[in-house]
Image (cartoon, rainbow, N blue to C red):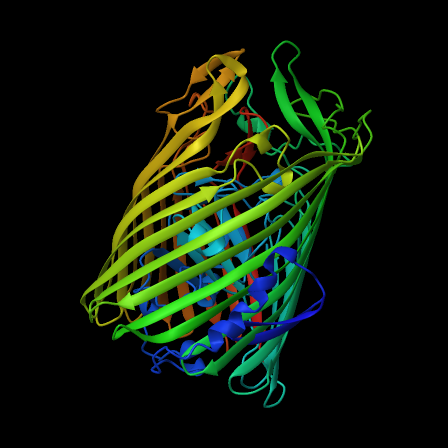
Amino acid sequence: MSRFVFAATPQGVALRFSSVSFPRARAGWALPLALVSASGWAQTASSLDAVTVRSSGETALERPVSTGSRLDVSLRDTPASVEVITREQLESKGDTSLIDAVTRSTGITSLGHPGNSGSSLSARGFTDTTSVMRLYDGTRQYGGVGVSFPFDTWSIDRIEVLRGPASVIYGDGAIGGVVNVIPKKPLRGPIRNEVQGTLGTDGKRALAFGSGGAINEQWSYRVDVSGDRSDGWVDRGDSSNRTFSGALRWDVTQDLSLQLSHAQGHQKPMRYFGTPLINSVQDPAIRERNYNVLDSRIQYKDRWTELMAQWAPGSNVMVRSKLYHIKSDRYWRNAEAYRYNAATGLIDRSDNTEIGHDQTQTGNTTDVTFTGTLFGRANQASVGFDVNRASFQHTNNTYTGSSGSVDPYHPDPGYFASAVPFIPRYRNHVEQYSVFLENRMELTERWSVVGGARFDHADLSRQDLVAGSQAFKRSYANTGWRLGAVYKFSPDTSLYAQFSKAADPVSGLLMLSAANAAFDVSKGKQFEIGVKQTFLEGQGEWTLAAYSITKNNLLTRDPSNPSLRVQVGQRSSRGLEGTVSMRVTKALQLDANLALLRARYDDFSESVGGVAVSRNGNVPTDVPERVANVWLGWKVMPAVTLSGGVRHVGKRYADNANTLKLPGYTTLDLALQWKATSNTTLTLRGFNVLNKNYFSTAYYTTSQWLVGEGRRFEVTLNHRF
């Protein structure tokens, strides 16, 4: 059955035509029309233009954000920790990698490795894609498989980071937080073009082009393309990437706009899986060695297509809808596990792994927002639904094979070998739907209350493609909610508090095995209190937040039978987070953040030699309890800016027993920028200029650690015309 769907975004309204059927959501398609026809709501509201236009004197805390709420309220009025990384900040710090940019925000660290497409993050003591969600322009790729797009910052307008549970807004899988990557959009105004080239150490070369503006009074566009290559910082560490992002917008009327967008990326990342410990320590002599096979391969191909609509049928109503289709193809062929053999003095290699992912998702998200009054008080309300279908086919060789042992210091890589065929093993299908609502009421001129709830339902089935039978079929349902309040002590100072309940799947939904399918979702709850303030007549801003999060229903070993798992485990975290941004002088800008965390297993055990061993009181793996970032920019002369930043990540543990410790580290980045003309800028950058040796994560075995990037330099020329 074919359908037209309207959707609203801060950039406009989009109309989509769909031939996809979602049987469980038929009643939902009529919901926007029923809500738009409601006549009892008050008539005072902002117009469509008022949603997107900002005054030149507006501070960052007064800017509306879409990630912390569907009501497009400002950062100051959102009872949660939300941070925005602007385009200006991306350019000043030179972060071309999305993960590098995100991990400059408060308390966010990376635990990326080839198995999760390099995308996994840690936030507030919780890790990986089942607890820290990634979005692209507000859309999530379901399943917890690992998100391989986007990866480059060239086409990005801004990144919004919401810390803490966000299931009310985006569904399960966001107890630690949400990162929303928002691309550049078509804008009204003259056509402007931009070209940029970069050369650097380790064979780095990159080229990018962007163009956008108004074609005529109704049509506007945006196009961005980029590509790069590098030889990498380890042996045979070459990589290449290319990406495209384009959008065409039609402003049908003043109140209705349609936008068709398409983005795609092709990555061939560095085929490096870490360096093993030798006699329980890291030997600096092998820090840059790569023990993968010579014919190793990693490749990610992603395509995101979206049709959006935004419609304001009245001054107090906004209808938003988007229809999207996502397709991801990923492929790995590598020797992944390395362990030092003290008896032979060699590195034993195992887990020769060949994997293929074929993932698709088609869905629609629609919401309606009302702005007006309720019981005589200013009020905003949003209701909507989300429906999608996803399919995931897993092809593998059962991770079987070895390409022989190698010398630690002079490895002969050899070639990939496996006696098990690379064939499709299983296919998972998920049909998901959710309904959600959110409301914000101003009780007084100073008090406002924000509440919301979301119900999620998913039907999952798994086909065993080898046996030709259905492995299992089951349904999941969960309701998340939050209640928060904001009190304005003054126009410059706000105090907020929030309580929320959320859920995470026990494993990636689209990779769920028959054993894990028997368990329910993990549940979490958070309490947070904080303050947000501007000072120095709007030239400075600071925030402070304190929180406590508990997540239970973890999978833990059965003490009476360690070969079995039971769902009684619990982990918790509590911490403090602070940010400050201020213009110290007309020439000096400071941005800094600090996160202090205490994360623990409260009820958790694992099998050691067939015996269940308690890990209660231990710190979860890959969770640093101290994270800080500082960036200082100094305009030495009108055309010359010197800037630099420090990034600190505290110690982490590689194992649940907390016996293997990844040391903390601090890196220094520097940049010298010369604005040769009003349209031409030349920048010299140095990353990790003190060449600090550090390790980013441990994943494949607890004694196999991935080395972080060493010192590198780049020179970039940017020209706009």
Whether residue 233 is visible here, answered yes or no, is no
For residue 366, which quarter of the picture?
bottom right
Which residue is drawn at the image coordinates 57% and 44% (left, top)?
144
Q: Residue at x 25, y 75 (%)?
A: 376
Q: Is residue 132 left or right of residue 532?
A: right
In this rendering, the answer to whether 594 lies above or below 368 is above
- Left or right of 452: which side holds 276? right
Residue at image x 49%, y 82%?
Answer: 313
Task: Identify the residue at horizontal 22%, vertical 67% (top origin).
Answer: 443
The spot of residue 38 in percent (x, y) is: 44, 76
Q: Please, is residue 590 above or below residue 247 in the view? A: above
- Residue 52, horizontal then vertical, whole percent: 44, 77
| Residue nearer the viewer, 235 or 541 | 541
**Residue 260 in which image quadrant:** bottom right
Task: Quarter of the image for the N terminus: give it.
Answer: bottom right
State left or right for residue 602 relative to residue 134. Answer: left
Query: For this rendering, which residue is in front, 405 or 247?
Result: 247
Vertical order, 185 against 500 (above or below): below
Q: Position of residue 351 (x, y in %)?
A: 69, 26
| Rendered location of residue 42, percent (x, y) | 34, 79
For the C terminus, the quadrant is: bottom right
The one of 282 and 454 positioned closer to us in this rendering: 454
